[in-house]
Amino acid sequence: MTRRYVIIIGAMKSGTTTLFDLLAEHAAIAPASYKEPGFFAFDAEWNKGFDWFDTLFDFDPDTHVYRLEASTDYTKAPFVTGVWARMTANPDVEVKLLYIMRHPIRRIESHARHVQINRREIGRQVSDRPDHGLDAGISPVNLAISHYADQLDAYAEARARGQLHCLTLEELQADPEATMARIWAFLDLPPLLKQSLTHSNSRERIRPSKTWKRLTSIKPLLALGKMVLPKSLRDRLRARALVRVRVNGRFNLTEAEKTELQAHYISDLDRLEQDYEIAARRLWSL
């Protein structure tokens, strides 16, 4: 039997959590028990096999069409490679890929703040960089992720097969209903109406409390909560469990830095339009 997955492949700090939550509302989609398993990115996870991977999804073949995950490590080349080869290694696996982008300079600022708090840029590895604030410069990983055309090159075969759909955070925010309608059509699923955005990217200065982390690490308890509590109530409980985090450092680029970065990314933005038909420069006024 074919195993079908919807996989949000990135980009980090571009609304992947918001998109994951919107997709998870569909009755035909079984979301992963945690958003970013990184199964196709790292040998340690890949070597556990698909049987292990599928334990992360409460999949009912009578109800569900797809399993859903959203690992942003899938678009962190050249620091993570070989993802598409793993996705196509099993002939019984079918993937549909979603790639969401954001204004590249805004994404860099958000990335720097996020990693300063969480200390992780790739998978669960703790960064060996002591400072991710912008006064210390932009990290190579941070810089590479906003090279959207370069990241998409690894999935050229998926695009040719009609297995890749691209969108931007800005269009999702401006017109969520139309943007999601295009995604539902890509997935051949009936659309959901009146979906609301959770604006997960606005939570960059807060994180779950230690108590909440301990509770949600207990998989049977997490599964029970998902079964008996409506999503609206789970979202309210999660919001109450968030605590504010003090972040030291500068996370807003200067005008001079923005100008330099715009020049740095101009060829990638041009290629994004020429090769992938995404009018990024017009959309982001770059």
Image: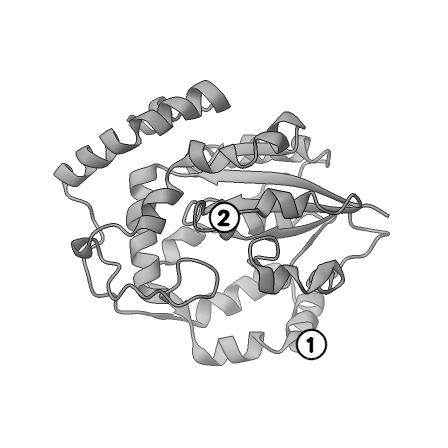
Q: Nearer the viewer, residue 85 or 98?
A: 85
Q: Which image quadrant is residue 158 in? A: top right
- From the viewer's perspective, tell me whether residue 149 is left or right of residue 231: left
Question: How are the colours assigned in the image?
Answer: one colour
Q: What percent of the width, then of the height, locates residue 164?
A: 60, 33
Residue that carries the numbered disc 2 in the rendered image? 16
Q: What percent of the width, then of the height, locates residue 160?
A: 63, 26
Query: Type of residue at label 2?
Result: Thr
In the rendered structure, find residue 220 and report the number of the disc placed on it.
1
Q: Nearer the viewer, residue 196 or 128?
A: 128
The answer for how far apart the CA atoms under marks 2 and 1 are is 26 Å
Q: What percent of the width, then of the height, locates residue 258?
A: 20, 37
Q: Is residue 249 visible?
A: yes
* Above or below: residue 269 compared with residue 172: above
Query: Type of residue at label 1?
Result: Pro
* Above or below: residue 200 compared with residue 55: above
